Amino acid sequence: MHEARARDILDAAGFAADRGDATLLALGENAVFAVGGGRVVKVGRDAALLDRARREVAVASWLAEVGVPVVLPAEPGARLVEEHPVTVWHRLPEAVRPAEPRDLAALLRRVHELPAPPFPLPHRDLLGGVERWLRLAGDAIDPADAAYLRARRDGFTEAAAALAPRLKPGPIHGDALPRNVHVGPDGPVLVDLETFAVDLREHDLVVLALARDRYGLDPAAYDAFTGAYGWDVREWEGCAVLRGARETASCAWVAQHAPADPKALAEFRRRVASLRDGDPEVRWYPF
């Protein structure tokens, strides 16, 4: 979605008065704007994401009720505006410092102690987008690489279904990275709740293990994360399976950008080659 289109949706949703002052904060899966009245508006990519947007608002309200520090919705539910889901949030105060892995660990501990909420949450479908991302990549990627990733997806889907978890399954964030924590004057707050699910708690912990090995996370910061959480998921025999599934998804996700961006194509090829070579420590770069 282009910024100009997202601003048109912002107008149609009733924020025309804010158009001149609306500040684009992020443009990815959603277009995120700061508008007047201390609010933030998220405009989703297409109508298919409406249920997810509604669920994100419900999750935020539930977490606040059970005492987890979380970004709060400024309007109930989500609206569909010209086939785009729109949600409105209270803007958080300015960050006092960047979030660190140990901040994330403290919030995950609280989430992982919770029972399921009084509304349904999906399972964490980590590999569900692989086919769509590869289809969007089209002829920009080698068909043999696409076939390789499809085979990995199928293998890891089957292997993940057979895992015996170490932790009791339940609510998870689903994309547990420090970037999804905001440290304001009152402490760390959990944000970006779109991937919230009920599944293996280990899903949330494998994310940082992979960041340590693939994306250059300082090992000392990872140790602070595991110390604050109280357990290192790498001790679990199923860690390699969830890691492999996440690597497969991350590789396919980059592929969708390859037709328009040579840097994405280069990063995709780097990732596929490291998977084919079985090298778990080749550096990957965020995209």
Image (cartoon, rainbow, N blue to C red):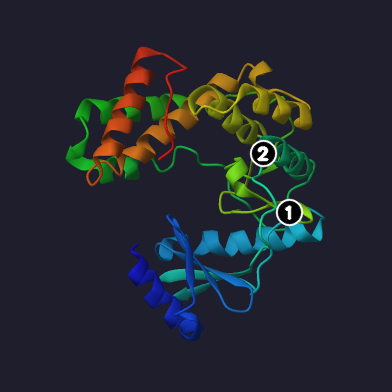
Would you say the residues marked 2 and 1 are in contact, meaning their CB atoms lie under 8 Å apart? no
Q: CA distance from mark 2 to mark 1?
A: 27 Å
Quadrant in the picture for the C terminus: top left
Name the amino acid, label 2. Answer: Glu
Does 53 sit above or below residue 178? below
From the viewer's perspective, is 224 left or right of 143? right
Marker disc for residue 259: none
Q: Is residue 101 above or below residue 13?
A: above
| Crowding at mark 1 (Cα within 10 Å: few <14, some 14-19, many 20+) | some
Comparing 146 with 184, the one in front is 184
List x then y, in percent, for residue 235.
68, 16
Q: Nearer the viewer, mark 2 or mark 1?
A: 2
Q: Is residue 100 above or below residue 260?
A: above
Residue under label 2, please give it: 100
Q: Quadrant of the N terminus?
A: bottom left
Q: Note whether 271 is above or below 261 in the view shown.
A: above
Q: Residue furthest left?
A: 139
Q: Residues within 10 Å of mark 2 (few under 14, many from 20)?
A: some
Q: Which residue is mark 1?
A: 117
Q: Residue 45: x percent and y percent? A: 40, 62
Q: Is residue 8 visible?
A: yes
